[in-house]
DNA sequence: TAGATTGTTAATCGATTAACAATC
DNA sequence: TAGATTGTTAATCGATTAACAATC
């Protein structure tokens, strides 16, 4: 379960990307692939791909490349996808519902076992067979059930409060969609999805785009 | 509008974060701040903050620090937030609705001027005063209206198709929520929000967490 | 003025790429 | 075996941190 060495964050960020491309290749019934072919698919250099994978062991074979199915499974294991992570959602607006309805999470080891909100009009509703509970019940729910991941899709004003309840309730990780940074003890992992920041990044790139209209007309699609 | 030099991607990613913290400080009526104080709020080193800001000019003053309002405005300008970006959404499931209902975008210069879907049951519905149109209409809509940003909140199987229509329709940027990479010409900016990848990252951190149960009990909150 | 804090240069650290010997 | 392609070391590049002179 635990890797001895510290893996660089840059590598960790790429693992799900490898996993996704390998999944596609598997769906296409491809059996083997070289770092060079992978490189032209994903856009990372072949060198980087080999370097990345060798953080975890030699999964390839000289003269052959990588067996896609085996590599997919290995990376899945490295990412911890061989375990199950129970999740609860707090805040069941559109975003919370989008996650709750994403049944793929269910199928792939991330079952949602509780949904909470403070809005009385939502409490009692059923989403994907799970009844929305009063957020007041969160603490007692966490006492009674083992919850691995707490999802915050509530207002940012409530976010730290919810996080504190998650922490007291022994969640291992928090998936935070509120546009703020949470204070958590170091043994709790947080993953932020700061959606609006990515829109701002996009605005930056658009407004600093060096291709004038003329270039745009002349340029072809790569 | 255009910066002469190339700004590092790492810096660009931090701009919205500075912007967000400065917004909070402004709301709290704080007038000035030093890089050191900012450092302890945001968690970046003071050195990095000064280094980052000096990519764009000397916004501070020795012995004083930074004027929050002025810095906020400067960074806003750098991020391109002094312009308006018209947007259309394609795919109005829960996620698309979450974005459409996020009225803050409207207020902050990102008006949504069109919503599209292929589902006949959704076409004609009104979301935040905007009628959902048949996705068949997208191409002609783009001919008739200047659209800066195309948002893809549809199935990944449709994503490249939608992107191609966006490109033909002269959008400047694509905000892609589908779990796939898009092929676009270099003069179109793409910002991906690969939500599931962040969940996988979280799973990685949880499963490689070095703090045992014992440590967890003993550790305090930072 | 003296103190504080920036702007900026230099040093360090980390991540990516290049190169090639090992080996299937 | 010969060819292909990995695993891995070394070189490069980029980003972060440290240090301090400039200056408000």
Image (cartoon, coloured by chain):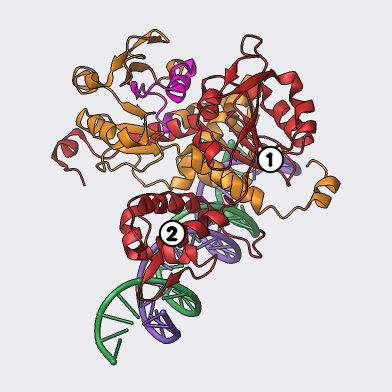
Chain colours: A red, B orange, C purple, D green
Identified at 68% across, 19% down, the residue is: A133
Quick one: which residue is furthest to the left in this view?
A: A218
Magenta run includes residue B207: no
> Sequence-wise, which precedes: disc 1 or disc 2?
2
Dot 1 falls on a residue whose secondary structure is loop
Residue A144 percent across, percent down from the top left:
79, 32
- Residue nearer the viewer, B195 or A27: A27
Residue B216, compared with residue A154, is above or below; it is below
Residue under label 2: A69
Please give the chain letter of the residue carrying mark 1: A
Q: Which residue in the structure is indicated by mark 1?
A: A148
Q: Is residue B187 left or right of residue B84?
A: left
- Whether residue A146 is visible, yes or no, is yes
1 vs 2, front mark: 2
Left or right of A73 on screen, residue B35 = right
Q: Quadrant of the C terminus of chain B?
A: top right
Quadrant of residue B200 within the rendered picture: top right
User: Magenta segment range?
Assistant: B77-105
């Amino acid at each position: 379960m635990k890797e001895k060495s510290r893996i660089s964050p840059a590598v960790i960020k790429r693992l799900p990307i490898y996993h996704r491309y390998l999944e596609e290749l598997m769906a296409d019934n491809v059996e083997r692939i070289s770092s060079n072919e992978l490189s032209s698919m994903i856009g990372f250099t072949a060198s980087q791909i080999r370097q990345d994978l060798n953080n975890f062991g030699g999964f390839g074979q000289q003269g052959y490349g990588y067996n896609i199915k085996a590599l997919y499974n290995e990376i899945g294991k490295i990412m911890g996808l061989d375990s199950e992570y129970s999740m609860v959602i707090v805040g069941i607006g559109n975003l919370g519902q989008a996650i709750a309805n994403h049944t793929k999470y269910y199928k792939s080891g991330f079952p949602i076992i509780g949904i909470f909100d403070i809005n009385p009009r939502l409490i009692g509703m059923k989403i994907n067979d799970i009844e929305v509970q009063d957020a007041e019940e969160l603490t007692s729910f966490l006492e009674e059930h083992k919850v691995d991941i707490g999802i915050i899709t509530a207002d940012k004003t409530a976010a730290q409060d919810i996080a504190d309840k998650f922490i007291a309730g022994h969640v291992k990780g928090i998936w935070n969609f509120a546009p703020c940074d949470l204070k958590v003890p170091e043994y709790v992992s947080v993953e932020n999805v700061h959606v609006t920041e990515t829109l701002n990044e996009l605005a930056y790139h658009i407004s600093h785009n060096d291709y004038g209209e003329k270039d745009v007309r002349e340029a072809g699609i790569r």
